Amino acid sequence: MRLGTRIAAAALTSGVLVTTAACGATARGSDGYTREAGAYAAAGGSAAASGALSARLWLRDLAFTRYTDVAVTSSEDDLATVHDSFAAIQPPTEADVATYDALDALLADAGDALTGLRIALRQGRSEEVAAAAEQLAGSAEELQDFAEDRS
């Protein structure tokens, strides 16, 4: 095979792979999708719990504001990555759409709470930080329950 043909073949293959990845992956079967959803829920729950813990430490004057801001922002970024990665997986069946919708809503709620926490923390609003920490603790528990139900 000539060099030009090999380069063209490689470019075509790369383009197909990028296009396929952009379309979103499909889980291999309903059981696999359910397990993947559980894993994403556990990861999202961990990010929510980390944000809640950081807020509680700040409220008790056990962590500096700058450190807490970095920790909360990191949790927010982690949760956004989990949410985006999960959203890219196509539910394999109509029945799995309910699983998708449920986890998508839980991850969105936790993400909104982390965003609210970050804003309140940066503005020094202790009452709103406390409320966001409670909301995040609830979100973390819901996500963990979701994960355990699908493991």
Image (cartoon, rainbow, N blue to C red):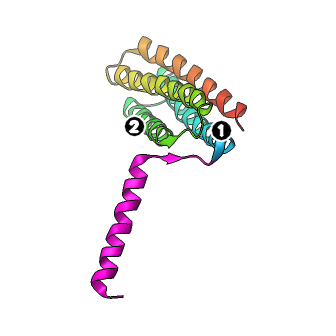
Tell me the residue that label 1 is attached to.
34
Measure the C-alpha gap from mark 2 to mark 1.
Answer: 33 Å
Residue 5 at what x, y percent from top left?
31, 81
Figure quadrant of residue 11: bottom left
Residue 7: x percent and y percent? 31, 78
Q: Amino acid at mark 1?
A: Thr
Q: Amino acid at mark 2?
A: Val
Q: Residue at x 30, y 86 (%)?
A: 3
Q: Quadrant of the N terminus?
A: bottom left
Among all residues in the image, which is located at the extreme bottom?
Answer: 2
135 within the magenta span? no
Q: Which residues are magenta?
A: 1-28
Q: Is residue 11 left or right of residue 117?
A: left
Considering the numbered disc 2 on the image, is that residue within a helix, a strand or a loop? helix
Q: Earlier in the sequence, mark 2 or mark 1?
A: 1
Residue 15 lies within the magenta run: yes
Q: Is residue 74 above or below residue 127?
A: below
Q: Quadrant of the C terminus?
A: top right
Identify the residue under disc 2. 70
> In the figure, residue 20 lies in which quadrant?
bottom left
> Which of 49 and 123 lies nearest the eye of the viewer?
49
Return the mark for residue 131: none
On screen, residue 64 above or below 86: above
Select label 2 or label 1 by which is in front: 1
Q: Nearer the viewer, residue 140 or 101?
A: 101
Q: Is 6 on the left-hand or right-hand side of 78?
A: left
- In depth, the one of 137 and 85 nearer the eye is 85
Q: Is residue 106 above or below residue 36?
A: above
Which percent across, then down, holds residue 34?
65, 38
Count of numbered circles on the image? 2
- Asked where in the image residue 142 lies, by quadrant, the reply is top right
